[in-house]
Amino acid sequence: MHRVFSGIQPSGVPTLGNYLGAIRNWVPMQDRHDCLFCIVDLHAITVWQEPAQLLAQTREMAATLLACGLDPKRCVLFVQSHVTAHAELAWIFNCVARLGWLNRMTQFKDKAGKDREAASAGLYVYPNLMAADILAYKATSVPVGDDQRQHLELANDIAQKFNHDYGTEFFPRIEPFIQGVAARVMSLRDGTKKMSKSDPSDQSRINLNDDTDTIALKIRRARTDAEPLPGHLAQLESRPEARNLVGILAAVTGTLPENVLREHEGQGFGAFKEVLTEALVAHLSPIRAEMLRLLQDAPALDAALRQGSERAEAIARPVLAEVKRLVGFLPRG
Ligand code: AQP
């Protein structure tokens, strides 16, 4: 069995993008692999988070992941900051990774924006922490979106340099499971930008806790064009907003965008948006109801996360002890 590690930031309410691009794909992996799923709060604070809100969002994320079908009996679900191995190994990796490698990371450039001098040092070394997340468990498979490919290559460079510098074969090679581009959900306001939980506009995304009326309103207001839907996908190439809505309907109804177009060819967006709203509400309402139910019992959620952390800690502890021996913090046994 492969060991799978994947993470999600509690930087807001999870969106339809997080769900279709990541969470939904994690559920069946629980039966096929040894899975660790982590709420990565250390990553979240690389940009400012209000403390009380961060705590609430971490619980909300846990409730959402459980409501979507992650089962603590079949996977290890935990919070990153509860297992100190992540931060400890990340420091060692800060000393292994080279500045030149980090300077090439496009996500830092995107997230730091124009005022790079004002970005946190944490945002800059984010990929080193991500390497530590994975390698603290010697995980070999990492399901991520295509945007994370560069970070995984860097994690492999770090693992190889560590192995080379300390004369060991300790860290394994990491293989990304890159989820298809079809799973990339774009903003409802701009079809060229990905849907993000921290986008300043709430109208740009569907949150997994949005109620029926909110979903209907957001889809009604979603940016589109005046043309009816064509019969073939290639005809949507220059219409990113239309392409996005077609992709969302395909993903939630378990079909291909080509089939959606075959069925709705010639339809205007008024009618199409009604069909899309109905499908989204049917798919997301049970998740929302379960999430709200779970959130009513905060002690039970906290207990589930505590147990997850204990299990994660038990896997990471011997890995970190061996790293400390290799580095020279502890005698080699
Ligand atoms: N729009 C998206 N379409 C498909 N997949 C997506 N993911 C995120 N947005 C989309 C996938 O969700 C997983 C967890 O992401 P994350 O929370 O670790 O960070 P992110 O990718 O930066 O997600 P957000 O929602 O955009 O968060 P913020 O706004 O805080 O930066 C990843 O596997 C990601 O690919």
Image (tube, grey):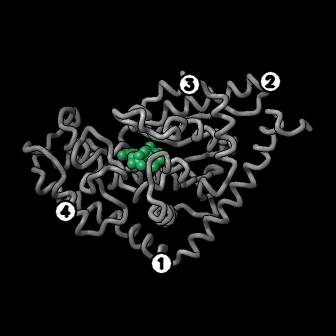
Q: Which residue is mark 2?
A: 167
Q: Amino acid at mark 2?
A: Gly
For marks 4 and 2, give the one nearer the viewer.
Answer: 2
Q: Which residue is mark 1?
A: 296
**Mark 3: is the Cβ under 8 angstroms from ligand 1?**
no
Q: Amino acid at mark 4?
A: Leu
Left/right placement of residue 127 relative to residue 285 reads right
Residue that sits furthest to the right in the current view:
333
**Mark 2: is the Cβ under 8 angstroms from ligand 1?**
no
Marks 3/2 in contact by CB < 8 Å: the verdict is no
Marks 4/2 in contact by CB < 8 Å: the verdict is no
Q: Earlier in the sequence, mark 1 or mark 2?
A: 2
- Mark 4 nearby-residue class (10 Å; few <14, some 14–19, many ≥20): few
Q: Earlier in the sequence, mark 3 or mark 4?
A: 3
Q: Amino acid at mark 1?
A: Gln
Q: Nearer the viewer, residue 267 or 225?
A: 225
> Label 3 vs label 4: CA separation?
46 Å
Marks 1/2 in contact by CB < 8 Å: the verdict is no
Q: Which residue is mark 3?
A: 99
Q: Give the image quarter of residue 208.
A: bottom left
